[in-house]
Each structure stands twice: as structure tokens, then as C-alpha cells.
Image (spheres, rainbow, N blue to C red):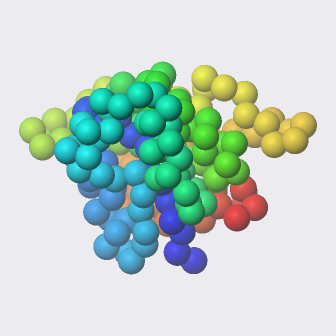
Amino acid sequence: MARKTFFSFHFKDDNSRAGVVRNSWVTQDRKAAGFFDSAEWEKVKKKKDSDIEKWIDGQLSGTSVTVVLIGQNTAGRKWINYEITSSHKKGNGLLGIYIHKIKNLDKKTSNKGRDPFKDWTFKKGDKVITYPVYNWVDDDGYKNMGDWIEKAAKAAGK
């Protein structure tokens, strides 16, 4: 089943790595949100926090899964945190994918970042839930991301 999926990532550090993931996703005739050009992000980030939140909420609209692309400096970033917590509150399925082993435009990899989901205790009712985290390179993300997204959606009841 095709899922409209929101991709959360640190734009400045990981845009080219995220592009590798995005390109694999859209070539499989699926819809992605959270990917935008640098001019759009530069324009949005100059606005008030409430405007940025409203813009992110608009990007999340209609999505059933949020994929956090985890680079070296993803965890703890203000807007990544907002996207994660908003996705959880919205009831989206969530998962993380480490992308540090994907080469950037300079043909360089980066250090593994920490798991951003570790910053919270997520609950669904009284039950504590954990969100899965995969590695794009080691876990063959190109082949398996669709299955990961489908599992996350089903776990969220979507």
C-alpha cells in the first residue's frame, strides 16, 4: 500500500544524504513530504516559531508515517524534536534510519549520531512504545524501506 510519508532530517548537514533516500522512495511511485528546496526552507526558517510550526504541521497533513533520517547532528535539534513529537501526537507511525554511511556530495560519510527517540518516553495509552531504528547501508534501506514504513504504519493502526 502506498503511504504518504513525512521525512524529517537536519537540512544543512544531511540534505544530500536525504536526497539519496528520497530518490529511492519516489522512484517506487510513492508520495513523500518533508522534502523541499533550500530556498523554501531558508524563507520559512526566517519566520516566527509559530509560523514554522504551522508550516511543519501543514507538511505533516495527510501523512501516516514519519521517517526520521538520523545523521551526525540530528538528535536534539529544535525542529526535528517538533516534527517527532507532533508526529507522535498525530498518531503517525514513526521510525528512524541512520544515514551517516551514505556519502554526501563530497563523497564523505559522517559519524553516527545518537538516536533522537531516546530523548522521550513515548506512550500509547498506558503502554510505553519504542520506535524502530534501522541503518540505510547495513540494513539495505533501498530494498527494505517500504517494508519498514508499512510496519510502522500498521503498528500505529494506520
Q: How many marks?
A: 0
**Residue at the (66%, 26%) spot, across then down:** 120
Image x and y of residue 7, in percent: 44, 50
Front one among 41 and 13: 41
**Residue at the (43%, 72%) spot, across then down:** 30
Q: Is residue 100 visible?
A: no
Q: Is residue 72 visible?
A: yes
User: What is the residue that sits farthest to the right in this orientation?
Assistant: 126
Image x and y of residue 144, in percent: 47, 63
When asked about the image quadrant of residue 117, the answer is top right
Image x and y of residue 123, in percent: 79, 36
Front one among 2 and 134: 2
Please, is residue 123 above or below residue 95 in the view?
above
Front one among 128 and 82: 82
Please, is residue 55 above or below residue 51 in the view?
below
Drawn side of residue 35 relative to residue 2, left or right: left
When asked about the image quadrant of residue 47, the answer is top left
Drawn side of residue 125 relative to residue 41, left or right: right
The N terminus appears in which quarter of the rendering?
bottom right
Drawn side of residue 21 relative to residue 2, left or right: left
Please, is residue 33 above or below residue 70 in the view?
below
Please, is residue 31 above or below residue 73 in the view?
below
The C terminus appears in which quarter of the rendering?
bottom right
User: What is the residue that sits farthest to the left in this orientation?
Assistant: 106
When asked about the image quadrant of residue 51, the answer is top left
**Residue at the (70%, 51%) spot, across then down:** 91
**Residue at the (50%, 32%) spot, across then down:** 50
Image x and y of residue 106, in percent: 9, 38
Drawn side of residue 37 relative to residue 74, left or right: left
